[in-house]
Amino acid sequence: MSAAYSIGDLARATGVKPTTIRWYEQEGWLPPPARTEGGHRVYGEGHLRRLGFIRHARELGFESEAIRALLELADHPDADCGKAHSLAIGQIREIDARLRRLAALRAELDRMAANCAGGVVGQCRIIETLSDFDHGHCADPSHRGQ
Amino acid sequence: MSAAYSIGDLARATGVKPTTIRWYEQEGWLPPPARTEGGHRVYGEGHLRRLGFIRHARELGFESEAIRALLELADHPDADCGKAHSLAIGQIREIDARLRRLAALRAELDRMAANCAGGVVGQCRIIETLSDFDHGHCADPSHRGQ
DNA sequence: ATGGGACCTCCAGCGACTGGAGGTTCAAGC
DNA sequence: GCTTGAACCTCCAGTCGCTGGAGGTCCCAT
């Protein structure tokens, strides 16, 4: 019913190298797939989606623990609701912080690109933009002028 | 004029461990600071900001090459304007993709948290949310219902 | 002047891959 | 139904970005 993929198909579809896919399996990120008589791995849609998720989460810079937790959440969505809830809330906080920083960095790169296009590069502030050594204090976004 | 920091001060201010700070210096991410008679490192405001930038950029999941490029851009804002411009544009694209994915993941976690709070956990879709194995095709955000 | 915490260098180890060696399987074309 | 070469298999050593420990020195508050 659901399509069957070789490890190479999966690699092509997700951009994750076969070697890395095997490694993910070994480390328990990806469930062991079925095998052909000869021992070749055979994947299904579920593997494809899960691998895509892992790749994007890694690209976004989430720690392996957070990814494991999210996968756990996906695997057992109705088990231990309270835990799932607090995990989700925690991740939302994390994500909001990222969104804020990315938006600030984007704005600064925008400004630079705009100036640059005009032939005059102003002072570069990308470091300042992303250098706020916060640790909670002054997390109010209204504090950063623009 | 500008304050002087020990490696420990820097570590406390940025959340980067002294060991890692020394390693950043060794690898050329951070310029070698002044030293006391006895050989202890002495940093200034510039180091502080630059280190904060590196930390945030790493947390956001940027590749080391991209970070190096951004630092380069910051160091020579008016040198080779065209290069700076295209680099900035490229990074903006990257950032927009991240912003989209993060927003999607956030929305899904939100939905889960909301359901969860009500005592009923629906189907978990976080994997689907972040599993789009795109590579350019279908990058239109309007395609993803919500 | 001294005690102990912070600092120094050097180096080995770890997590997350990556790549190569050496051998087997699969499937497309004859 | 045989061939042949690309894709797959396992095992294992190497890389990158840190991290931690050993063994020793510096700094400064008392």
Image (cartoon, coloured by chain):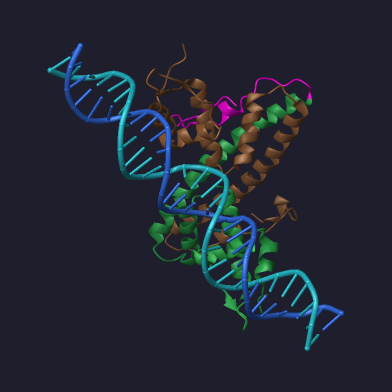
Chain colours: A brown, B green, C cyan, D blue
Number of numbered discs: 0
Image position of B126 (left or right of C19): right
User: Left or right of C13: which side holds B111?
Assistant: right
Q: Is residue A56 above or below residue A31?
A: below
Q: Is residue A17 visible?
A: no
What's the magenta region?
Answer: B118-146
Which residue is pictured at 56% across the width and 41% down the height?
A: B99
Report which quarter residue A145 is drawn in. Answer: bottom right
Closer-to-camera residue (B133/D24) = D24
Is residue B34 inside the magenta stretch? no
- Where residue A117 appears, as percent x and y from the top left, is 43, 56
Residue depicted at 70% across the width and 41% down the height: A93
Q: Quadrant of the N terminus of chain B?
A: bottom right
Residue B12 in view: yes
Task: Give x and y (percent) for residue A42.
Answer: 43, 21
Magenta span: predominant SS is loop
Q: Residue at x 69, y 27 (%)?
A: B112
Quadrant housing residue B135: top left
Q: Tell me: residue D18, above or below residue B140.
A: below
Residue B122 location in percent, x, y? 69, 20
Q: Is residue B82 above or below residue A44?
A: below
Q: Is residue A119 above or below residue B111?
A: below
Residue A40 in the image, given as x and y percentages of width and height: 39, 24
Residue B141 lies in magenta, yes or no? yes
- Foreground pick, A101 / A9: A9
Quadrant for the C terminus of chain B in the image? top right
